[in-house]
Image: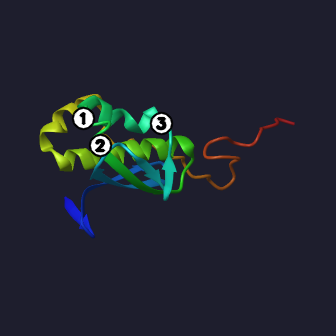
Amino acid sequence: MEKTTKTNKYWYGLGRRKTAIARVRLFKGAGKVQINEREIAAPSRVYMEPLKVVGFDKNFDIEVNILGGGISSQLEAIRLGIARALDKFDETLHQTLKKEGFLTRDQRKAERKKPGLRGARRAPQWAKR
């Protein structure tokens, strides 16, 4: 999916993990990373992995809008969003990204707390007498 903002063409990818949602836009550029409108000087290697695997780590500027979740789930959501945007940019990269596991969403979430229990499954301590 190619879109344009003003004059810039970009590729969009949505990444999710637990409760984190990352909306990622890839622009042709020099490798700048911007998360929630803040410039990131030293990007995390977790979410740069898909770009490094396909050899485009310095070819794209990345804009990310992320909300929800914790640090780890946000990083993994960004990684999935980048991989999906790369897949839309060039479909020949699909096999490489899929083989490395970057296009697979990790659907695991925290189980809800049930009534009468201390957590999702932990029961209160039982005493015989």
Q: Amino acid at mark 3?
A: Ser
What residue sits 69% from the left and 53% below the top?
116
Q: In this rendering, is residue 48 above or below 18?
A: above
Q: CA distance from mark 1 to mark 2?
A: 7 Å
Q: Residue furthest bottom?
A: 6
Q: CA distance from mark 2 to mark 3?
A: 15 Å
Q: CA distance from mark 3 to mark 1?
A: 18 Å
Q: Quadrant of the N terminus?
A: bottom left
Residue hosting label 2: 83
Mark 1 nearby-residue class (10 Å; few <14, some 14–19, many ≥20): many
Residue hosting label 3: 44
* Quarter of the view holding residue 52: top left
- The answer to whether any part of residue 19 appears in the image is no
Residue hosting label 1: 97
Secondary structure under the numbered disc 2 in the rendered image:
helix
- In the image, taking residue 47 as reference, residue 83 lies left or right, namely left
What residue sits 57% from the left and 47% below the top?
70
Q: Tags 1 and 2 in contact by the CB under 8 Å rule?
A: yes
Q: Position of residue 126 (x, y in %)?
A: 77, 38
Pointer 2 or 3: first along the chain: 3
